[in-house]
Every structure is written in C-alpha cells, then in structure tokens.
Amino acid sequence: MDFASAHVGSSQVAVEIDAVVLTRDDMRLHLDVVPARRVRDLDTEGLVQIAMRELGLQQLAVTPEDLRAETRRSNASLVWSYKDRPVAVPLRLRVLKVLADDGSMQLGALLQTIRSGQVPSPAVMALACANALEIDLTSGPLGLTTQVRSRT
C-alpha cells in the first residue's frame, strides 16, 4: 500500500494513496465508498481529514446505492465493456485533439467530427475507460446528446 503524507500541526500524517482520486471541474476528489471505508478512531480520522485538505483532496462519499443507481449503472456497464478495446494512435490523437480544440461537446458531434473508415464509438468508450476523456454517465441514457470532455 502506498502513502502520501502531509504536515498537520507538528505531526506528519500518512494518507493511503492507492485510493481512487477523481478530477471534476478542477477539483480533486477522494472517492470514499462508504462500506469499504477503513475504521479509524476519532483523533486519527480528524488528522486524516486535515491531511486530505493539505493534499488538495476533497471527500466524495458514495454509497452502494449511488453506484447501482440508474442510468449510471447501465451507462457505466456499457462503456466499461470496451475497456480492452485497442485504439489506434491516429484515432486516439484525433479524438483528443478535437476535445482539446473544441472543449466539451455532445457525443454525436464528436463522433461526426472524427468519423473515418472505422466506427469511432468503441474508441471513444475505450478512451473513457483509459481515463483519457470523461463521459457523462448520470444525466440520462448514453446517446448522441451525452456530454464528452477531455480529462487533460
């Protein structure tokens, strides 16, 4: 297990860093899955919370119900089914360039822009699984109006 540390007063506090850290709207969030949370005494928990702030992490508590909520669950399953799909370098670069140049856009517009000899949607899903881009999984069923943006 890897740890990061932060100074809290005169103490050095170690914080597990093999946790999931998300970036959302220029914020860094530590994903706290409630039932998987480590049990800590009150003093240690307070120090960890201060250390997390020192490291620039905000806590995002998620319950099993949140993870199973529709449409997130169905959309995540669909996207994740492409996790092992290889993406050719030219297509990867084209997708990332369009999103870097144009910013957040609808999935349909992105697919239309990067259209080539191959169907580009599997590549977009695989890039989301590789954490290269972000797809809105919660606003509704995955479709042409789903928002997509670069992670960089």
Image: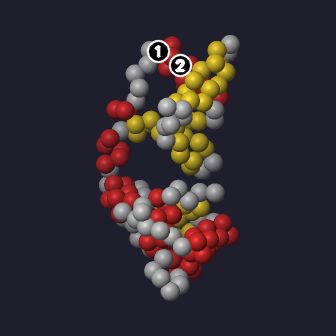
Circles 2, 1 touching at the beta carbon (< 8 Å): yes
Q: Residue at x 58, y 72 (%)?
A: 89
Few, some or many residues within 10 Å of mark 1 (<14, 14–19, 20+): few
- Give coordinates of residue 116: x percent, y percent: 53, 84
Residue drawn at (55%, 61%) of the image:
133
One can see residue 125 in this view: no
Q: Residue 137 sits in which quadrant?
A: bottom left
Q: Position of residue 67 (x, y in %)?
A: 35, 46
Q: Is residue 108 above or below residue 67?
A: below
Q: How far from the left and from the top, in percent, is residue 144?
A: 45, 73
Identify residue type, mark 2: Gly
Q: Quadrant of the C terminus?
A: bottom right
Query: 71 left or right of 56?
Result: left
Identify the mark at residue 12; answer none if there is no mark. Answer: none
Query: In percent of the image, x 49 and y 61: which residue is there?
Result: 128
Q: Residue at x 43, y 67 (%)?
A: 85
Image coordinates of residue 122 in percent, x first then y, are: 44, 71
Q: Secondary structure at mark 2?
A: helix
Instruction: Report the number of numbered marks.
Output: 2
Q: Which residue is mark 2?
A: 46
**Local crowd size for mark 2, using a 10 Å CA cut-off: few (<14), some (14–19), many (≥20):** few
- Local SS, label 1: helix
Q: Nearer the viewer, residue 17 or 30?
A: 17
Give 31 or 132, whichever is nearer the viewer. 132
Q: Which residue is mark 1?
A: 42
- Could you tell me the amino acid type at mark 1? Leu
Q: Is residue 97 visible?
A: yes
Most foreground residue, 54 or 108: 54
Does residue 111 sit above or below 32 in this rendering? below
Q: How far separated are the C-alphas under marks 2 and 1?
A: 6 Å
Q: Residue furthest bottom?
A: 117
